[in-house]
Amino acid sequence: MVDFSLTETDKKLIDLVREENEIGRAFARELDRTMEIEPSRLRGVHPAVADREDPFELLEGVHEETSGLVIAEALMFMASAQDVELRDVGGHEAFGSMVLRNFGTDVQKEKYGHLNLAIGITEPDAGSDPGAMRSYARYDQETDEYVLNGEKIFISFFNKFDGAVALVKVAGKDGSRPEFGTFVLVKGAPGLIESPQMRKLGVRKHELSGFVMQDLRVPAVARLDADFGKTLSNFNHNRPIVSAVALASCRSLLDFTRDKLKAAGVELDYTQGTSGRSALVDRFIRLESLWEASWGTVMRAKWLEHKQGMYSNGYRTEASIAKAMGAKAARDITQGCLEILGPESLSEEYLAEKWFRDVRIADIYEGAGEIQRVLIARDIFGYKKELS
């Protein structure tokens, strides 16, 4: 039987992230305007939360008292819109570091394991289509090095981290077809040129940049045993989290909208059927129902991950469903709330329009919604790649 009850530790962790998010909202508009808050939080902890426990670090130590590590993590993300990063993002394992941990040898982990590594996949001409990637590497037998050329963009926190794990095409031997390979790139290497931070319409607290590889030489030991499939298997864990973060912003906007309706004298009666309530109330309740349904897809994926293991492919379809449905729901819910609120929703006095802008990206990064639907169709209906 499905059990949605939470442990006391679950509840404590959820309360902690909610409280910290409330603290962060005081800086949310400043960060949205300037993409920075003072004092700088590039390293360390913002003074506003310096005397508080880091909820996610606390989770690592008490996860046996929760519903499960990955389940509790998702619940915490859905409880906080994360309007501001008040803690050093280096405190949590970076995506590229996860790839190194999963597919690196002992020698590679010894050499690079102390680094925070971002992940570099997207290129100016290649997003969801890996076949369009132009970044490539060739092996130099004389020096036992690989020479990399190309460009990567939309990389989370690359400007803060020590380097990146980059997915590129590797020239085949004797003119054979190129294959995908992943390489550890460390900042400061000649030929690795960092791009400026990107300005965006939303999620401005989430820093994005990129880099250019210009005859970048890396030692052969920097190549990981991770092809395209292995590298992207890590997305099974992340995709439901993307929806969880978007749904947290939706929850904030739903609560804000409910408060505004209550202030205007609109009563939300959940006991009435469609014929017994106004169109306004009916629409709001439907938006809340959509949020709850999307919450369920995230929890389903995370429950399977808890049972099967973080890097199992057995819950790949459920992870894609959580990503596709949650991201689409986030767009619909935030837009619906803005339409209910009217002109007041666009005022910078509130965060409503910010939440609306922030969730748009959820349907794009970590695999666009259209691509998730293709993956779901392949798994459920057995569609071959050439038919999609």
Image (tube, helix red, strand yellow):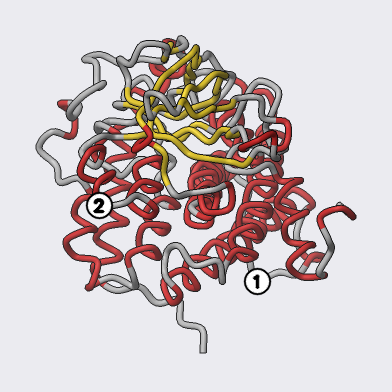
Q: In the picture provided, is 359 more to the left or to the right than 98?
A: right
Q: What residue sits 40% from the left and 40% below the top?
A: 96
Left or right of 215 on screen, residue 367:
right
The residue under the point 20% across, 38% down is: 114
Q: Secondary structure at mark 2?
A: helix
Q: CA distance from mark 1 to mark 2?
A: 60 Å
Looking at the image, residue 188 lies above or below residue 89: above
23 or 317, nearer to the observer: 317
Nearest to the observer: residue 293 or residue 66: 66
Q: Is residue 202 left or right of residue 276?
A: left
- Residue at the disc numbered 1: 271
List x then y, in percent, for residue 272.
71, 69
Is 312 placed above or below 237 here? below
Residue 265, horizontal then vertical, whole percent: 60, 45
Q: Amino acid at mark 1?
A: Thr
Compared across the picture, whether 119 is left or right of 68 comes to right
Residue drawn where x is 66% and y is 45% of the image? 333
Quadrant hosting residue 184: top left
Q: Which residue is mark 2?
A: 106
In terms of depth relative to the viewer, which is nearer, 324 or 335? 324
Q: Residue furthest right?
A: 387
Q: Amino acid at mark 2?
A: Asp
